[in-house]
Image (cartoon, coloured by chain):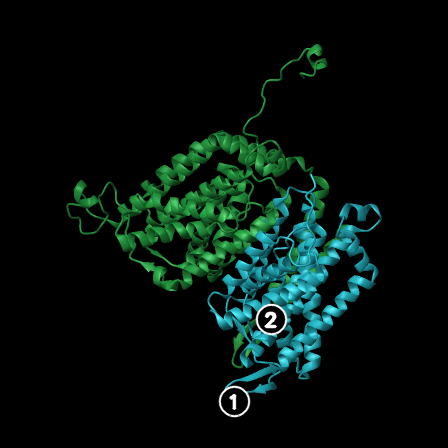
Chain colours: A green, B cyan
Amino acid sequence: MTALRDAFLSAIVAFGLFGPLVGLVTANGEHGLALTARPIATAVIVGLVFFGRLAMLSWRGRTPRATNRALAERITRSGKYLTPVLLIAAFALPFTGSRYYIDLGTLVLTYIMLGWGLNIVVGLAGLLDLGYVAFYAVGAYSYAILATTFGLGFWTCLPLAGILAALWGVLLGFPVLRLRGDYLAIVTLAFGEIIRIVLINWVSLTNGPNGITGIPRPTLFGLAFSMDGGPGTFAGFFNIEPEVIQRIIFLYYVIFGLALLTNWVSLRLRRLPLGRAWEALREDEVACRSLGINVRNTKLTAFGIGALFGGFAGAFFATRQAFVSPESFTFIESATVLAIVVLGGLGSQLGVALAAIVMIGGLEVLRDLLSTLGDQLHSPFFGDIANELPLYRMLIFGLALVVMMVLRPRGLVSGRTPGVALTKVKEIAPELVAQGRG
Amino acid sequence: MAYALQQLINGVTLGMIYGLIAVGYTMVYGIIGMINFAHGDVFMVGSFLSLIALLGLSALGITSVPLALALTLLFAAGLAALYGWTVERVAYRPLRGSFRLAPLISAIGMSITLQNFVQVSQGARVKPIEAIIPGGIRLIDTGDFAVQLSWMQIAIIVITLTILGLFTWLVTKTPLGRTMRACEPDLKMASLLGIDTDRTISLTFVIGAALAAVAGFMFLLYYGVIDFYIGFIAGVKAFTAAVLGGIGSLPGAVIGGLLIGLIETFWSAYFSVEYKDVAAFSILIVVLIFMPTGLLGRAEVEKV
């Protein structure tokens, strides 16, 4: 009975929340804005809240919370088998030959790489960085400007873009060293916005809102992927027909390699004293300081190395699109990458990859599926949902962040196992304990 | 001179709006020590609720301007308060006592959710409305430049001062205000002394959201155009105002808001409009680094 009352109250609250904003739409009529009523949508949402609350209350009453933990442990354990499977699948993806899937794979891998880069800052060092997109932008614009003004190639610019982004990371890291978690978050957010506004307004360097076009594509050991098939090109060298797909596949493997590099470096770093210092910093800054860890250098290296990979990913983004504009580097992008890291479980490499696959690839595939379904059934219903789905992406991201934090604040795949741990319990004789050596 | 006076008037009006939002940030920070990231978006929701109420009232045929304004204010503040309550209940309360990044990430999630919820439900296009109170007073007319104080600006200043007066009375004179002030320095101690801290925190969010909705209403009146994205920039600026005034200090938030409004207006008038957001963000960074306690704030002692 209390459950019913509770659900009823929730429904009233839901009506208050969604009644005006969902039920009354402000749309442009003949005389300016006018209201259009949407009673059905409101009723559906209020009904969902009512029954959802009812279901939640009865469910919570029965199941013990331990199942939640068991699931996470199972995912963590199955990671041992999942990792090679994912690697092989990622390696084999271009053999499908479908341009759509390779493009999607490239996009997902870009986000995985960004996620792994940000993971160093947020997941390992525990510094909440909301302006990560700034380094992505620095990397992209570094390559774009270097390539279009000085005619440098992708492979020369890639390290330069990374180093420039890392430099910015350290530079921006310096003033925020003393700030705590939430202040740090808002200052990094401000930095990200400042960089974007500067990119928009510094027209002489960045061409402003129009962006930079004609960014050269990468080459394979000097072999270009151009359509003429001449002697200096990839197709000409191997004596095959030039096709666009060759370049797409090549780009896919480039980002695959870059992402693996990011993963490898961060896995190795975690085993170094530096990586352990990061993890210690994440848990308790005051304790770190009192144990003699140089907090300043630890934070700056985290910012720098995180930014380095952001810069690499940015350079790749620029060369893939052949076009950069400030529009690609909004706060939403930072929030997306942060969402991936958080959903992946703040510190877990596999978790980040899974989260990126589900959140970037999953939604895309779902949209594709729905629109095919709509075409097959000749019903506009599924097609409409498919068209609307991209709009809901960020809504789902936002809700997922909240739900994730409320249910499993330590992440889906618990990556917070300590890097070092005592495995063997040593037996100590009582007299040693008495001497104070225990 | 006349030009500067005009900027002063505009800046004060804008500052009033920022000050009202900043109060919400500073109250929440004072009590539970977290940045309510979704506060800027509650402001945006308040603005949309006002828009819906105004359109609804005109559809119902209510033409009396004072009545329409009062009803809209009540409607928007009441429902935005419900939003504030829900946000706290859903996203923050379960995380009290969790590790330190958890509530912050949840708040960011809530902010993204609210923004995109409004985008999906109300559309991404900007929503323009006609001026509700047209006209104004000409203060000085030098021939080539006239200093204008519009009725709208007078209304905004009067409403803000009234609401702030009401709010001050609430905090200083009522039992609710007393419990809020008791929770601020030490939440645990307050709960040991028999204060229902959960209820107090909820009410803090409710009051903050209602004030943000008033600000949202005035933003709509002043600019005459809103979209789902206004909460982000206004939120960061209001947060800057709260930090500048000294986070946790209520008069500080209003003073900070006025300062930010003035700085932004004068910066746009004399330097460049394009970089006005950069000016606000830079102030935030400079204040946090060199003057973390702000103008009226107290130094925070880090307890281990």
Circle 2 — which element? helix
Decide: is B267 above or below A158: below
B166, A90: nearer the viewer: B166
Query: What chain does badge 1 belong to?
Result: B
Q: Residue furthest front?
A: B1
Q: The N terminus of chain B is located in which quarter?
A: bottom right
Instruction: Please give the name of the residue rendered at 18% of the width and 40% of the height, measured from the top-left corner.
Output: A238
The residue closer to the viewer here, A174 or A372, is A174
- Look at mark 2 in the image and give the residue it sits on: B14
Label 2 marks which chain's residue?
B
Residue most toward the bottom? B143
Left or right: residue A283 versus residue A240 is: right
Tag 1 residue? B143
Q: Using the rendered view, name the quadrant where residue B58 is placed.
A: bottom right
Residue at disc 1, secondary structure: loop
Q: Is residue B258 left or right of residue B282?
A: right
- Which-is-in-front pick, marks 1 and 2? 1
Residue B117, position as x, y percentages in the image? 57, 60
| First in residue order: circle 1 vs circle 2 | 2
How many numbered marks have been drawn onto this rendered protein structure? Answer: 2
